[in-house]
Amino acid sequence: MKRLLFLMIITSLLTACTEKKIVDELGLINGVSYDLSDQEDQYFITVSFPKTSEKTSEYHAKVIATNAKSSKEAKMKLMQKTNFNLVSGQARLALFGEEVAKKGIYNIVESLLRDPSIGSRIYLAVASSTGNEILNKKLIDEPDNVFYIFSLLDKAQMQNSTPSINLYEFTRDYYDDGIDPILPVFKTLDNEITLDGYSIFDDDRSITRIKGQNVQLLFILRKSIKNGNLYFELDSGEKIMLSYFKSKRDIQVKNKSSLKVDVHVHGQIQEYDGKKDLTDKKQIKELEKEMSDYLNEKLNTLIELLQENHTDPIGFGQYVRNDSTFEDWKKINWNETYKNLSIDVKSTIKISDIGKVKR
């Protein structure tokens, strides 16, 4: 009996040691980037995976890279550069270098979809320079760049302030003939990695990028947003920071070449620099009208920019398609129709409260 108990204890200890050794030998890839290579018909593929130092027990990211034609070939080559067994089951982020995004990312996205170890919730993003630079950037107090970017995107998604686009959402919009995809763009700045706007796609190619307040305007047009901030600098010289807690947009199809867009924004003034008396209801109404006109102008300018670049990230095409029969929609040359589409935007801003006033 004692001998049996002894054998059971020894077996369990050996099993635990074996399992720990197997885990310790795994390189759990949490991020990958794709850049143009100086080798013909290849990508420069970089992967990042967490590693714990045996001497100090400190956690940091290990980054390695290689030239390859595909992710599978890259993994085979990268396995020769590390003593870890690389696996993709923990992948959280896929980055595309700017030049790769401009050429088209369909083949890469398709390979990610085919990989059963990669979930459809993996975030996608564009690097303003190269993905390799983003993954290798040394950040202060941030041992893992992938986890840092993932946390930024996850927080934005939770707060509903800016959309974080995962593999499922990108492919959904890519295959939808009534909308074009978007992806967030990250850049390195000094000792930081920061969000640098959104890349706007035509099919699978990055066509243009929007930054600053245009990002918020795009999201207001794409869907109803629960919270955000808008800055107004009116012709009168008044400067206003509006924190909105509700935005709603309604799109109506007048005919196949004309749309009407109603945008309603409700919020409170966080800062005001001007001469109006914001305790006077009449002057508040005047300010709402001036801000609505300003928002109208900015929204129209953004829509014109998107039409000039033949990209429809707002999804106007979905509304025209849903208002058409299947046969009629297939007869429409949407790219040509969209370019000349008449879009009537009407904005209404409602101020519910006032904050800081500067005179």
Image (cartoon, rainbow, N blue to C red):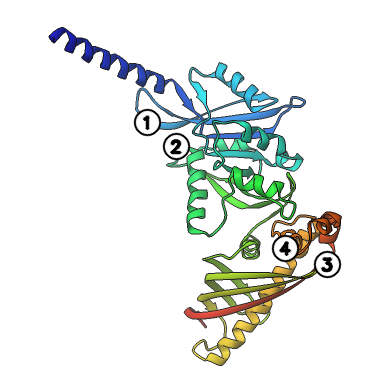
Which residue position holds label 3? 257
Residue at screen point 48% across, 52% down: 155
How far is disc 1 from disc 4 in space, using C-alphas? Answer: 53 Å
Q: Secondary structure at mark 1?
A: loop
Residue flagged by tag 1: what amino acid is it?
Glu
**Farthest residue, direction left:** 2
Q: Secondary structure beneath disc 3?
A: loop
Q: Is residue 249 above or below residue 121?
A: below
Q: Earlier in the sequence, mark 4 or mark 3?
A: 3
Mark 1 touching mark 4, by CB under 8 A? no
Up the image or down, 226 lies above or below 90; here it is below
> For mark 1, what is the residue?
58
| Sooner in the amino-acid sequence: mark 1 or mark 2 | 1
Residue drawn at (63%, 24%), measured in percent from left and top?
Answer: 72
Please rate how many residues cluster around mark 2, counting C-alpha atoms within 10 Å: few if below 14, some from 14 to 19, many from 20: some
Q: Return the disc, 3 or 2, that comes first in the chain's sequence.
A: 2
Q: Position of residue 300 (x, y in %)?
A: 74, 69
Tell me which amino acid carries mark 4: Tyr
**Residue contact at pointers 4 and 2, CB within 8 angstroms:** no
- Estimate the spatial distance between the alpha carbons at disc 4 and disc 2, rounded to whole Å: 45 Å
